[in-house]
Image (cartoon, helix red, strand yellow):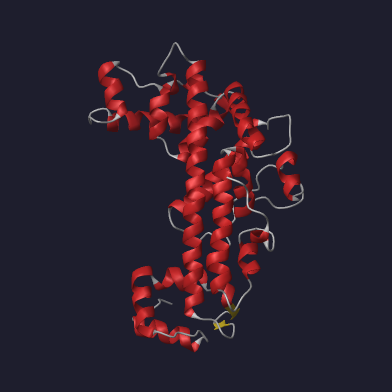
């Protein structure tokens, strides 16, 4: 059955009939017009539902809109940290790939530079890299144009900055194990600075599982999808030095926003993680604790995979 178009007045009437309190209808109309009824109500009223079409007693539109605002704020905070992780991984990959192929600067276009087990991924990435060069080599004021004009080729440490996170993940995945191990060793510095007690670096497969979930979470944040209740498609690999520190066992799920949040300690500096951690706490206190009246803050924390009352833990020094 096709859903009929509803005017702003009809949308508000539906919410009121379901038990939602709306104090200022004109203000609510403007909010729905600029933020989309479907995004707000279908996306963020779920925690306030008593039944499928009935809200908990006392639920207000203000609470739902504040939850929507909170989700947007933590997505931006998380995305900023993920961009730092992406930068560090790009730098490490470009260095070690360039080092391994120092006498063949465009070896990234050669199938023999990669692990032959991933033939379809290799074909995809070589096509993508060729396309990036082709689309940029005729436009001045970018690094690809400069290197093509001056040197006749584009080194990997230049090209890597034109890749998205998904392409970076694929390049690391299809690289020889020797390059993957060097990237994992580079990340060990971040692990130690974030006070994860280990003398070993993680296996490439463990690193890749974390990067994959960070990438999935990054896409949710970058495309402004709902973060609360989001789960990655697969668990990241259990790594005892990280997970046992935060009371996560091998039998626990590791596909939540919280486990991705924790994994970022393996890819960003202690200062960058402290900023992420402390900003999350601030958003929980300043938005959720101040404005949620009908439901507990812990209900939202659980939807993200965070422990109850997580925001009350001590701040990390910056």
Q: Residue at x 52, y 74 (%)?
A: 45
Image quarter where the N terminus lies is: bottom left
Asked if 216 appears above or below 174 in the picture, the reply is: below
Residue 179 in the image: above or below residue 216: above
Q: Toward the viewer: 260 or 172?
A: 260
For residue 161, which quarter of the picture? top left
- Compared across the picture, whether 6 is left or right of 207 comes to left
For image coordinates 56% across by 32% down, the residue present is 173
Residue 92 picture location, percent across and down: 52, 27
Relative image position of residue 154 (x, y in whole percent): 35, 22
Quadrant of image for the C terminus: top right
**257 lies left or right of 71:** right
| View extreme (top): residue | 103
Tell me if residue 128 comes above or below residue 307 in the rendering: above
Pinpoint residue 290: horizontal percent, then vertical percent. 55, 72
Q: Residue at x 58, y 72 (%)?
A: 47
Farthest residue, direction front: 317
Q: Residue at x 54, y 43 (%)?
A: 272
Quarter of the image holding residue 2? bottom left
Residue 243 visible, this angle: yes
Residue 313 as seen in the image, left or right of residue 106: right
Tally the marks: 0
Q: Can residue 256 be seen at all in this image of the molecule?
A: no
Residue 230 location, x and y as percent? 57, 58
């Amino acid at each position: 059955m096709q859903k009929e178009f509803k005017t702003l007045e009809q949308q508000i009437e539906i919410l009121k009939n379901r038990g939602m309190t709306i104090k200022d209808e004109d203000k609510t109309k403007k909010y729905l017009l600029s933020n989309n009824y479907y995004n707000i109500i279908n996306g963020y009223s779920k925690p306030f539902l008593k039944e499928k079409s009935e809200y908990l007693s006392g639920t207000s539109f203000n609470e739902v809109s504040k939850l929507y605002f909170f989700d947007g704020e933590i997505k931006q905070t998380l995305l900023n940290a993920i961009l730092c992780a992406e930068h560090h991984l790009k730098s490490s990959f470009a260095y070690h790939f360039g080092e391994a192929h120092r006498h063949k600067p465009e070896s990234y276009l050669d199938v023999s530079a990669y692990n032959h087990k991933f033939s379809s991924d290799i074909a995809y990435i070589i096509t993508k890299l060729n396309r990036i060069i082709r689309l940029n080599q005729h436009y001045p004021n970018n690094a690809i144009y400069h290197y093509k004009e001056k040197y006749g080729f584009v080194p990997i440490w230049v090209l890597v900055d034109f890749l998205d996170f998904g392409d970076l993940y694929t390049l690391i995945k299809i690289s020889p194990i020797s390059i993957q191990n060097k990237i994992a060793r580079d990340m060990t510095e971040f692990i130690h600075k974030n006070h994860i007690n280990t003398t070993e670096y993680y296996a490439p497969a463990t690193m890749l599982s974390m990067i994959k979930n960070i990438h999935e979470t990054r896409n949710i944040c970058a495309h402004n999808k709902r973060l609360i209740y989001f789960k990655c498609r697969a668990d990241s690999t259990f790594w005892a030095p990280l997970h046992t520190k935060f009371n996560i066992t091998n039998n626990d799920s590791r596909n939540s926003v919280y486990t991705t949040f924790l994994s970022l300690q393996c890819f960003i500096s202690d200062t960058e993680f402290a900023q992420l951690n402390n900003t999350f706490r601030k958003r929980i206190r300043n938005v959720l604790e101040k404005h949620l009246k009908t439901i507990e803050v812990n209900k939202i924390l659980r939807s993200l995979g965070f422990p109850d009352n997580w925001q009350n833990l001590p701040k990390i020094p910056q």
